[in-house]
Image: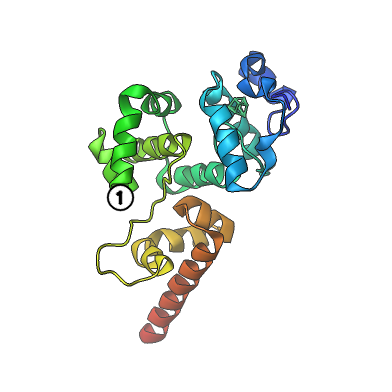
């Protein structure tokens, strides 16, 4: 498959970007087609191809522009899965920020990648990793999240279970992200949106959303 034939990027989008950046795409030389495989192995293979691609930033920019227009996301583009690209959409809707693509690319380089991998292995949450490598602003956090994804790391917004904590992941999600889930529901988000933004499975997102809805109903009943 070549970058010219991949559906997420149309000639019109490329023309607006003003260059035939696809000519430099690493995936032009890939003989097989890992970009539309849902398995983790397939995604890993595609991500490996993207990681060395000199037009990674241009590809993600083009995919995001086209998907904003079509609202149709599928396959790997710009080094991200479709749910990860949807997660970036909700980062912007909820926090009003987009990642700094050039900075995220820099964070995947030798100077930062080792540090980020070490922090991730220690179990630090996204915000903690962002703070360790330079800041707490919303844009720095989402930029760090993109770098984590490009490095093939989790990038979830859910903190790992503390020692002795017996709660399920969805219970921790509901407790920690109640306000965001309520805002997303009010903005018309569905189960795929919630799970994509939080970086959890769809099942986990549904259970957490149900829990948040139940809590909201209980509050209304008490108030009534
Ligand atoms: S970033 Fe990945 S999908 Fe995009 S052009 Fe490069 S290799 Fe192809």
Q: Which residue is drawn at 52% across and 23% down?
A: 52
Q: From where the camera sits, is residue 136 visible?
A: no
Mark 1 element type:
loop
Indicate whether 129 appears above or below 192.
Answer: above
Q: Where is residue 68 in the image (x, y as percent from the top left)?
A: 62, 39
Q: In which quarter of the image is ligand 1?
A: top right
From the image, tell me which residue sits under label 1: 123
Q: Where is residue 137 in the image (x, y as percent from the top left)?
A: 30, 39
Give the position of the N terminus as an image quadrant.
top right
Q: Where is residue 71 in the image (x, y as percent from the top left)?
A: 66, 44
Q: Local crowd at mark 1 within 10 Å, few (<14), some, or many (≥20)?
A: some
Q: Which residue is drawn at 25% across and 33% down?
A: 134
Q: Residue at x 40, y 63 (%)?
A: 173
Q: Nearer the viewer, residue 92 or 43?
A: 43
Q: Which of 152 and 181 is in front in this view?
A: 152
Instruction: Tell me how many marks there are.
Output: 1
Q: Where is residue 189 in the image (x, y as percent from the top left)?
A: 55, 58
Residue 49 quadrant: top right
Q: Does the residue labelled 1 lie within 8 Å of ligand 1?
A: no
Residue 218 quadrant: bottom left
Residue 78 located left or right of residue 30: left
């Amino acid at each position: 498959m070549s970058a010219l034939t991949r559906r997420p990027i149309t000639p019109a989008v490329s023309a607006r970007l003003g260059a035939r950046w696809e000519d430099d795409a690493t995936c032009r030389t890939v003989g097989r087609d890992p970009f539309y495989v849902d398995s983790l192995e397939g995604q890993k293979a595609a991500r490996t191809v993207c990681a060395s691609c000199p037009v990674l930033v241009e590809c993600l920019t083009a995919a995001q522009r086209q998907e904003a227009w079509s609202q149709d996301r599928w396959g790997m583009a710009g080094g991200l899965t479709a749910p990860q690209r949807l997660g970036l959409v909700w980062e912007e809707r909820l926090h009003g920020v987009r990642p700094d693509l050039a900075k995220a690319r820099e964070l995947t380089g030798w100077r930062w990648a080792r540090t980020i991998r070490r922090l991730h292995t220690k179990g630090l949450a996204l915000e903690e990793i962002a703070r360790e490598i330079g800041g707490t602003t919303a844009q720095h956090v989402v930029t760090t999240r993109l770098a984590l994804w490009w490095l093939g790391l989790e990038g979830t917004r859910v903190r790992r279970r503390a020692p002795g904590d017996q709660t399920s992941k969805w219970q921790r999600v509901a407790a920690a992200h109640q306000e965001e889930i309520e805002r997303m529901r009010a903005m018309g988000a569905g189960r795929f949106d919630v799970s994509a933004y939080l970086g959890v499975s769809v099942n986990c997102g549904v259970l957490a959303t149900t829990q948040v809805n139940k809590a909201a109903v209980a509050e209304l009943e008490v108030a009534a």
